[in-house]
Image (cartoon, rainbow, N blue to C red):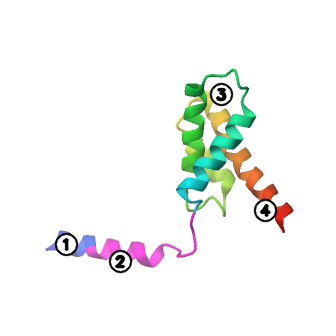
């Protein structure tokens, strides 16, 4: 009984505290943006398997609900899965993709 009350209170609490307007990119848009940016940013002769891990990290950054509020923090957090230079590159790919989105929107307005 206590467990079900605690679970119910937790679920209600999550619904209450989660902002309704916070959302990241759609899955398809995140995949397309990450793929396009990373393919253009990393030399073509670099293997697809090498690029793939950065595309996946970028994807998880772009679908994060906080990406529009704190893209630097989100990219840093998602890239922390990689140690050292690989993490730095993952962060750059995520931030570069988001900055390209910002530039695209600035010129569209």
Query: x and y percent of residue 54 in the render?
Result: 60, 36
Q: CA distance from mark 4 to mark 3?
A: 30 Å
Secondary structure at badge 2 equals helix
For numbered disc 1, what is the local secondary structure?
A: helix
Earlier residue among tags 3 and 1: 1
Marker disc for residue 82: none
Q: Is residue 50 above or below residue 100?
A: above
The answer to which of marks 4 and 3 sits earlier in the sequence is: 3
The label number, if any, that marks residue 12 in the structure image: 2
Structural crowding at the residue carrying mark 3, measured as other residues with C-alpha within 10 Å and reported as few (<14), some (14–19) or many (≥20) = few
Q: Earlier in the sequence, mark 3 or mark 2?
A: 2
Closer mark to the observer between disc 4 and disc 3: 4
- CA separation in Å, label 3 and label 1: 45 Å
Q: Nearer the viewer, residue 68 or 56?
A: 56
Badge 1: residue crowd in 10 Å (few <14, some 14–19, many ≥20): few
Q: How many angstroms separate mark 4 from mark 2 (CA)?
A: 36 Å
Magenta region: which residues? 8-23
Whether residue 18 sits left or right of residue 95 in the image: it is: left
- Image quarter where the N terminus lies is bottom left
Q: Residue 4: which numbered mark, if any?
A: 1
Q: Which residue is mark 4?
A: 105
Q: Nearer the viewer, residue 82 or 59?
A: 59
Instruction: State the residue at coordinates (22%, 76%).
Output: 5
Residue 20 drawn in magenta = yes
Report the disc number at residue 85: 3
Indicate the position of residue 78 as horizontal and vertical percent values: 56, 45
Residue 84, relative to residue 68: is it above or below?
above
Q: Residues within 10 Å of mark 4 (few under 14, many from 20)?
A: few
Q: Residue at x 76, y 50 (%)?
A: 100
Nearest to viewer (mark 1 / mark 4): 4
Q: Is residue 5 above or below residue 64?
A: below
């Amino acid at each position: 009984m206590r467990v079900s009350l605690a679970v119910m209170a937790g679920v209600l609490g999550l619904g209450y505290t989660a902002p309704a307007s916070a959302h990241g990119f759609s899955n398809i848009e995140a995949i397309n943006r990450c793929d396009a940016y990373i393919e253009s940013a990393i030399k073509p002769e670099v293997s697809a398997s090498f690029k793939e891990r950065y595309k996946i990290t970028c994807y998880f950054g772009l679908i994060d609900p906080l990406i529009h509020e704190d893209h630097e923090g989100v990219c840093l957090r998602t890239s922390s899965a990689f140690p050292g230079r690989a993490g730095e590159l993952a962060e750059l790919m995520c931030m570069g993709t988001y900055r390209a989105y910002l530039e695209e929107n600035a010129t569209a307005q």
